[in-house]
Amino acid sequence: MRSVTLLGSTGSIGTSALDVIRQWPELFRVHSLVAGKNTHSLALQIQEFRPQFAAVAEESDLECLRSDLRETGLERSQWPDLSWGPEARIAAATSNSTDIVLSAIVGIAGLEATYEAVKRGKLIALANKETLVAGGQLVMQAARDRGTEILPVDSEHNGAHQCLRAGARSDAIKLILTASGGPFRNTPVERLSSVTPAEALNHPTWKMGQRITIDSATLMNKGFEVIEACWLFDFAPRDVEVVVHPQSQVHAMVEYSDGSVIAQVCATDMRMPIQYAFTWPERGAAPVPRLDWKDSRHWDFFPPDFSKFPLLRLAYEAQETGGSSGCTLNAADEVAVEAFLKEHIPFPAIAEVVADTLSRFPQRTPGTVGEILEIDRESRALARECVRQRAAVQA
């Protein structure tokens, strides 16, 4: 039986992972649950899965969790050890009793605990994008040094991982990642300046958190996935191609030197890649309904419009530049998305803020997690200044 720590247990990835564990009680048990501020959901998870350890983001959240646990009726003797903050996340991720660490905390807060788990040789089921977008060089070097297996649980990289098993890595010449195109796939570019946060949050395929949904609308999320793919699978940016695929059933493709293209196809349900990572290198029974190939279907593929979605181009450029560019790209995007959601800037200004921040931030080469976090803080401060300047011009 494998013991699992879930970093980000109350989010969409975390709850999907618990669905997988619920389906396979003979294979998996929960060791630790780590959440942010959703203490009500965390308390219910503790009641059901009985972890040994649970943690929240802030000390103030801890009393809320205790109160919520009392409301569940769970006897105090059955409570797990409770803690809070970054050190608690690291303790959960590095426990000797944990085999698998699901890294699904949203944002840069997930980096340090994931990095420490990598150094301890845990099997990493990776959903946190910042781990590789901001810390790819550091994390992948640690994984190589320790022999740590990092299995991506987002659908595209998980699909790529499966496609790359079809041949030698040296024979794989191109990786193709698919994108739904987001809610503005067919929206005229001149209309984008007037779109609302509510429109941008209406993703055609996935139900996700606010930031990742906006990143999908700008194709920034796909840009982050390009960066992640380069680190995970050792591809140069020029050898990672993005194609728009509105049906979202082909998740990734790999082209080999003989001209063969291997595609990974499955239902659009996050339990598929999560189960793949948890059961690796074996495969379990399908956790969701299978595709019915007797049903009539067609698939469309076409290139993205880089002029309409400039953040995708900026992601390619950031990976080519290297150094601190990925960290700055991510930090500036998070600040800009927050400003858009608060209606401080229009939708196209998200890309403008990110571009301004990248052009103004001095390039550095971080060598530690602490240096990455400092670059993140400085990049956010600069991005907020860019937001204020744009908001002042529009006022």
Image (tube, rainbow, N blue to C red):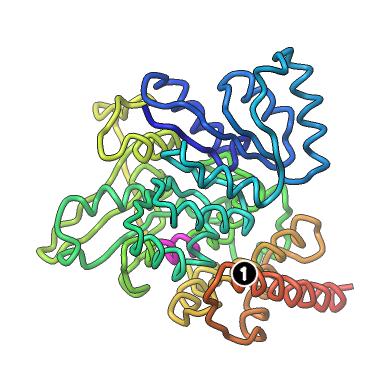
User: Residue 93: where, in percent of width, then height?
Assistant: 53, 45
- Residue shown at 29%/27% (left/top)? 292
102 up-or-down from 225: above or below: above
**Which residue is more in the foreground, 18 or 244?**
18
Q: How many marks?
A: 1
User: Residue 289: where, in percent of width, then height?
Assistant: 36, 24
363 up-or-down from 36: above or below: below
Residue labelled with disc 1: 370
Q: Which residues are magenta?
A: 223-228
**Residue 247 sits inside the magenta stretch:** no
The secondary structure that dominates the magenta segment is: helix
**Which residue is more in the foreground, 392 or 163?**
163
- Residue shown at 66%/31% (left/top)? 81
Residue at the far right in the pictured view: 395
Left/right of residue 361 with respect to residue 257 in the rendered view:
right
**Residue 226 sits inside the magenta stretch:** yes
**Which residue is more in the foreground, 101 or 204?**
101
User: Residue 48: where, in percent of width, then height?
Assistant: 59, 18
Left/right of residue 177 with respect to residue 91 in the rendered view:
left
- Whether residue 53 is visible here, answered yes or no, is yes
Q: Which kind of residue does numbered mark 1 sit on?
A: Gly
Q: Quadrant of the C terminus?
A: bottom right
Q: Quadrant of the N terminus?
A: top left
- Whether residue 201 is visible here, answered yes or no, is no
- Residue shown at 72%/18% (left/top)? 76
User: Residue 221: where, in percent of width, then height?
Assistant: 53, 58
Label 1 packing within 10 angstroms: few (<14), some (14-19), many (20+): few
